[in-house]
C-alpha cells in the first residue's frame, strides 16, 4: 500500500498554533475570519475525502497518524484564509492557472496523490488550486522570496477559532504526535496519552 504524509506548510503550522479561542457559533467546526466552516460541511468533505483515498487504494492509515477529519479541517481552514487574503489584496487567478496548479504532482507520483496529501477532495480541487495560485501570486506581489515572511504574517493574521469538541490545538506537532488537536480529557486536562 502506498503511504502519503500530510503536507503541512509552515504558515499553516504557525496559523494553527496561533489560533485563538472564543465562543463558537452553533454548528460550526471553525470560524475563520469572516467565514464559517460548518460541522456538516466538514463531515461531508471528510466522507468524500475518505472515498477519494479508497479510490486511490489508500486508507486513513496513510495519513501518518492524523485523523481524516483533521486533515480536511486543516485544508478547509487554509483555503478559507487564502481566499480571504487573495480577496483582500485583489489578486486575480485565471482558470488556466488553476488548471496548471492541479496538474502539478508536487513531491508525489501524481497530481491526484498530491491533492490527497493536502486533504483535497476532487470536488474541492479547483478551490484549492485557486488558493495555491493566489498565495503564490500574493507572495510575488510582496516581493518574491523576500515576501515570504510578510505572506506568513498576513496568513496568521486571520486566526481561526476551532470548536472545542475537537480538543485543544496540539502545541508541538511531531512525527510521533502529528495530529492537529490533542484530547483534553474529561475535565479539560490534556490526557497522558496525548502528552506522551
Image: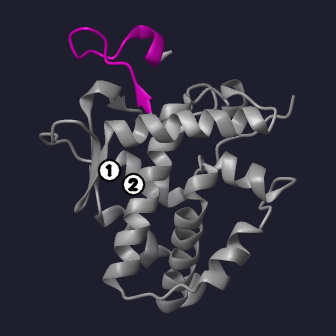
Write the residue at 65% across / 34% down: 51
Q: Write down the region rendered in magenta.
A: 181-195
The extreme left residue here reads 23
Which image quadrant is residue 62 in? top right
Viewer-proximal residue among 71 and 97: 97
Where is mark 1, residue-wise?
A: 18
- State whether the magenta stretch is mostly helix, strand or loop: loop
> Taking the image as drawn, is residue 133 in sight?
yes
Is residue 73 placed above or below 88 in the rendered structure?
above
Residue 52 is left or right of residue 13, and the answer is right
**Residue at the image position 50 percent from the left and 51 percent from the top:** 75
Check contact, mark 1 vs mark 2: CB within 8 A.
yes
The quadrant of the image that shows the N terminus is: top right
For residue 188, what is the image quadrant? top left
Q: CA distance from mark 1 to mark 2?
A: 5 Å
> Is 185 covered by the magenta stretch?
yes
Residue for badge 2: 15
Amino acid at each position: 500500500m502506498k503511504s502519503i504524509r500530510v503536507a503541512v506548510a509552515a504558515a499553516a503550522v504557525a496559523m494553527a498554533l496561533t489560533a485563538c479561542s472564543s465562543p463558537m457559533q452553533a454548528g460550526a467546526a471553525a470560524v475563520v475570519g469572516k467565514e464559517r466552516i460548518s460541522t456538516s460541511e466538514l463531515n461531508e468533505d471528510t466522507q468524500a475525502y475518505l472515498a477519494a483515498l479508497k479510490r486511490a487504494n489508500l486508507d486513513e492509515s496513510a495519513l501518518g497518524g492524523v485523523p481524516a477529519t483533521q486533515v480536511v479541517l486543516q485544508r478547509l481552514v487554509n483555503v478559507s484564509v487564502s481566499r480571504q487574503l487573495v480577496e483582500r489584496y485583489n489578486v486575480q487567478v485565471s482558470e488556466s492557472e488553476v488548471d496548471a496548479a492541479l496538474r502539478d504532482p508536487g513531491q508525489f507520483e501524481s497530481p491526484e496523490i498530491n491533492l490527497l496529501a493536502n486533504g483535497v477532495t476532487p470536488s474541492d480541487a479547483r478551490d484549492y488550486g485557486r488558493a495555491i495560485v493566489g498565495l503564490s501570486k500574493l507572495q510575488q506581489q510582496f516581493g518574491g522570496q523576500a515576501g515570504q515572511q510578510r505572506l506568513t504574517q498576513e496568513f496568521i493574521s486571520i486566526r481561526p477559532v476551532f470548536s472545542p469538541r475537537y480538543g485543544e490545538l496540539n502545541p508541538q506537532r511531531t512525527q510521533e504526535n502529528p495530529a492537529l488537536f490533542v484530547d483534553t480529557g474529561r475535565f479539560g486536562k490534556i490526557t497522558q496519552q496525548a502528552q506522551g
